[in-house]
Image (cartoon, grey):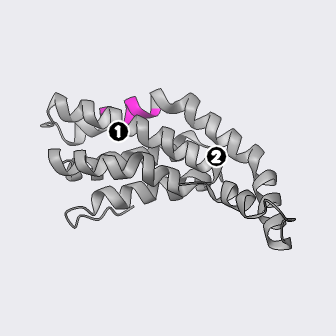
Amino acid sequence: MVSPLEQMLIEAEARYLTPEQLEQLKAYVLGWPKRLHVYRAVREGESQMVSRTLNTLQKEMPNLSSQVVDLCRRHLILLLRYSALAMLLQDENLLKERLIEWMEEEVRLYKLQSAYEVAYRICQQELRDHLAPGELEFIRPLITQAQAALLSLDGLRSTE
């Protein structure tokens, strides 16, 4: 699947962009510096945020197996990376296609919903602590989208 920006450019192949498309392109370009800044902040803080999330998770859920903790580590890293990339490119489909669809199987297979409900709550707090005011709102919708998709597999819903 192509990104919204790519789709707009494909549609305008033999014509000029419409005024609405020009506004979309302008908003994309004007938002790029801030999205890039947030992307870099998440990238630079990833290791610390994931480590602190897992430490807190293990305190709250001391009976988690090392296999589950390792899966959580891998999934949290991928969640941050794909969410940051989708935010940077303003492409929610990227997150769904490259992360959520395949991760759903592992969450269901290993029955990770309860651990992930706690892990995602902690990770959201780590993001709030790590990002400056206003920056969190760039990436939060994508994290929340993944969280909602993965935690609703067995009817579980996360509350923030």
Helix, strand, or loop for circle 2? helix
Q: Position of residue 82 (x, y in %)?
A: 49, 42
Residue range in magenta is 49-55
Q: In the figure, residue 110 lies in which quadrant?
A: top left
Depicted 18 relative to depicted 9: above or below = below
Q: Position of residue 125 (x, y in %)?
A: 45, 47
Q: Amino acid at mark 2?
A: Leu
Classed neighbour count for the residue bearing mark 2: other residues with Cα under 10 Å, few (<14), some (14–19), many (≥20): many
Q: In the figure, residue 131 lies in which quadrant?
A: top right
Q: Amino acid at mark 1?
A: His
Upstream in sequence: badge 1 or badge 2: 1
Going 48% across and 50% down the picture, which residue do you hit?
95
Going 55% across and 39% down the picture, which residue do you hit?
130
Q: Are marks 1 and 2 in contact (CB under 8 Å)?
A: no
Q: Position of residue 40 (x, y in %)?
A: 64, 34
Left or right side of 104 for 29: right
Q: As rendered, which of 133 and 142 lies closer to the eye?
A: 142
Q: As rendered, which of 15 and 64 lies closer to the eye?
A: 15
Left or right side of 66 for 4: right
Whether residue 102 is visible: yes
Q: In the figure, residue 7 lies in which quadrant?
A: bottom right
- Which secondary structure type mostly characterizes the magenta part of the structure? helix
Residue 75 shows which numbered tag?
1
Q: Position of residue 68 (x, y in %)?
A: 20, 36
Residue 133 shows which numbered tag?
none
Q: Which residue is mark 2?
A: 88
Going 45% across and 34% down the picture, which residue do you hit?
49
Depicted 13 relative to depicted 110: above or below = below
